Structures are given as structure tokens and as C-alpha cells.
Amino acid sequence: MKVIADVSIVPLGVGVSLSKYVAECEKIFAEAGLKTSLHAYGTNLEGEWEAVFAAIKKCHERLHEMGVPRISTNLRLGTRVDRPQSMEDKVRSVQEKLGSS
Amino acid sequence: MKVIADVSIVPLGVGVSLSKYVAECEKIFAEAGLKTSLHAYGTNLEGEWEAVFAAIKKCHERLHEMGVPRISTNLRLGTRVDRPQSMEDKVRSVQEKLGSS
Amino acid sequence: MKVIADVSIVPLGVGVSLSKYVAECEKIFAEAGLKTSLHAYGTNLEGEWEAVFAAIKKCHERLHEMGVPRISTNLRLGTRVDRPQSMEDKVRSVQEKLGSS
Amino acid sequence: MKVIADVSIVPLGVGVSLSKYVAECEKIFAEAGLKTSLHAYGTNLEGEWEAVFAAIKKCHERLHEMGVPRISTNLRLGTRVDRPQSMEDKVRSVQEKLGSS
């Protein structure tokens, strides 16, 4: 089962500068072979269900190893069985509607 | 690694009455041995990481089998390594502050 | 326009104990006359759109006044025009499906 | 109070093709003068609190006028008072950490 997800990881108890931790998870997502796209409030992920969730778990584990005592993650998670769809398809589909208006 | 999560599952392409699908996932969560608590915009879950995510995957699979073509799930996901904490601890901790004010 | 919402407010830069801040927002929500229900990963809110968002804004402002430098809030937000629905209706509707199975 | 937000709007009861509705909200966000950036699972928004929430409300109202009976929106919402920060700052800050590793 393929998943398109969007993950926003919020480390708690380490102050207000979080980019170091976000970058660490970006590396983990890339090493896992996922398609990723960073934006200003999270990261798009695309891959097989097992691979996506193994990478998110590894991200939590790594941050705790780095000394983060608590993490609150927000995740959007889409699956569909009617037709295949990629991250690029989703963006293009909206842009086509905008272009034709 | 223990997780406290909150999951809101939104089936798409099956109209506006979603409670049948939410109920199906509630059964899956209970059968998985997770601690659960239903509320008006989702379900609290508590358990080991692997058990929580296996149950959420099973919920997506079951709904697709029931004919749901597309699902968009929103998930909050908390882990902490500084001290153990249950769902009840979290609620009680807020209520104590409210009671003492 | 009536809204059923679910809000999870995460103060950053103030350590890992957040219940004091959550409690402060609970008071604001109650003072605003909203229907509220606290759970282990957020708070259900029900009310008119303007009242709900004025209360959430006031919560952010109050926490910043209390010294919280940064806040990351996650919000689920439902509106419907096909029929009226309360927080209790949503929970009951799922429970009925569970009871009859 | 300035806000960086990320909004994922999910219309219910109108089938599985949602890009028409997402495009409509994109236009509303742009007309409102907000800084916006579309991605595969939502849209980043930056602006003053009042302007951001007026635009999100207008989006719900417009979709209901277009015949959408029910909408479930997921919103991430960040405010900070320690220092100014833009959407571009957030992405750049992570990319710098990735580049230096």
C-alpha cells in the first residue's frame, strides 16, 4: 500500500531552534529511499507504508538519542486504491485548475 | 517505544456519513489491545509503537476493502523518554491545574 | 457558521511540562462560552466560527504574555451545511454502530 | 500577531477529486494578500492572524456555496514572539544544516 504523507515533527524541551532536528529527520527520510519535499511547515513523503513508518520511527528514535526528551509529531496520511497518484500529480492537478481560470 | 496518539480518519468518496467507518476502526484498535478513547474529532490511542501503527494500517486496509476509494488521516503522535506517562496522566495533569486556580 | 474543532496547543521553549499552559487555554475557552471537552491529546470545541477563533487567538496571546516564546498549534476544523450536528451527536453515532455489531 | 500556517482542506460528500476545491481556496488566499506556497498535502500561508483566518473562513464559505456539504480541515499554526521568521527562513534554516553535514 502506497502512502503520500506530510510530517511535522516538533521536539520539546530543547528550546525554540528546531531546524537541527528537522534536518536530522530529512537525512533519515532520504536514506530510507523515500521521495521527500521539505516545506515551511513539514515535509511531504511518498513511499510504501512500511518504509514511510519505519523512517518516521527511526526519526523519533534518533532525536531521543540526540537528547530530545519529548516529541509531538503531526502527520497527514493519504492512501487511495482507485488510481495511482504521486506528490507531483497532486500539485499539478491544482495548478491546472488555477491556470485555466 | 511507547506512543500516545490521536487519530482522525476521513474516508473520501463515500458521502458525508462516516461513523460506520470510524466504528470499524474502533473495533480494530480494541482488538489490537490498544488503550483507546473516542472523542468528537478522533480517537486517543496508547500502546507500543509497532502495535499502534499496525492497527492504523489495518484500519486503512479494512476501509479500502469496504469500498472506500481514498482515505485522508490526521495523526498526532507523542513519544517521551524522560518519564512514563499515560493518557489519564495527561488529562489529570491539566485538570489539577484547573482545580487549583 | 458553526464549527466543531479540535485543538492541540504545543508551547515551545518552556520545557516539557505543558499542562499549565493547556489549563490556561481551557479557562479561556470556557470563558468564551464555547462547549469544550478535554482529552489526552487536545480539546474538542464547539461554537460559532468567530467565537472559536477569537478564543484560540486569545489563547496564543495569553501564552505569549506568560513567557512562551513560540507556539505550534494543530487544529482540526469541521463545518457542515447539510444538517446540524453536535459533538455529542458525533460520538453517539459511532457508539451506536459499535453497539449494534 | 503574525502567523505561519499550513492548511489542508478536505471537502466531503463530493467524491474523490478535490483539486477543483483546493484551487478555489488558493485563489482566495492569493486575493487576501497572503504569502502562499502550495505543496502535495496542503498550503503554507503567512500573514497577520486576522487576515489568515478571514481567508480560511472565506474558503469554507465558498466551498459550501459550491455545493460541498461538509468540510474537514487540518491546520498547523505557528506564532512566535522571540524573533521575526518567514516561511523562507524556516526552509533555509533546515537546508543550511543539511548542506553543512
Image (tube, coloured by chain):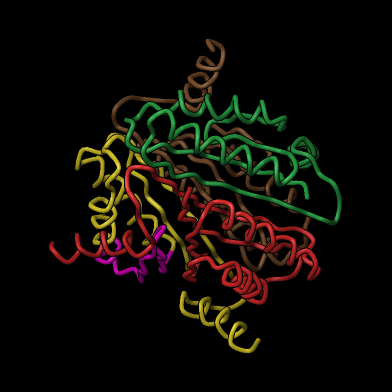
Chain colours: A green, B red, C yellow, D brown
Front-lying residue, C28 or B82: B82
User: Which quadrant would the N terminus of chain D be assigned to in this image?
Assistant: top left
Q: Residue furthest left?
A: B100
Q: Residue furthest bottom?
A: C100
- Name the residue rendered at 47%, 21% in the picture: D89
Q: Position of residue C13 (x, y in %)?
A: 29, 34
- In magenta segment, residue A71: no
Left or right: residue B26 versus residue D4 is right
- Read off the magenta span: C29-48
The answer, for residue B66, to whether it is visible in the render is yes
Total number of numbered discs in the rendering: 0
Q: Is residue C10 above or below residue B42?
A: above
Left or right: residue D29 versus residue C67 is right
The answer, for residue A101, to whether it is visible in the render is no
Identify the image quadrant of residue D72.
Answer: bottom right
Left or right: residue B34 versus residue C50 is right
Q: Position of residue D54 (x, y in %)?
A: 47, 49
Q: Position of residue D62 (x, y in %)?
A: 62, 56
- Name the residue rendered at 45%, 60% in the picture: C6
Q: Residue furthest top?
A: D100
Q: Position of residue D57 (x, y in %)?
A: 51, 54
- In magenta segment, residue C46: yes
Front-lying residue, B62 or C97: B62
**Dominant secondary structure of the magenta stretch?**
strand
- Name the residue rendered at 74%, 50% in the picture: D20
Front-lying residue, A44 or C53: A44
- Name the residue rendered at 27%, 53% in the picture: C19
User: Which quadrant would the C terminus of chain D be assigned to in this image?
Assistant: top right
Q: Is residue B88 above or below residue D18?
A: below
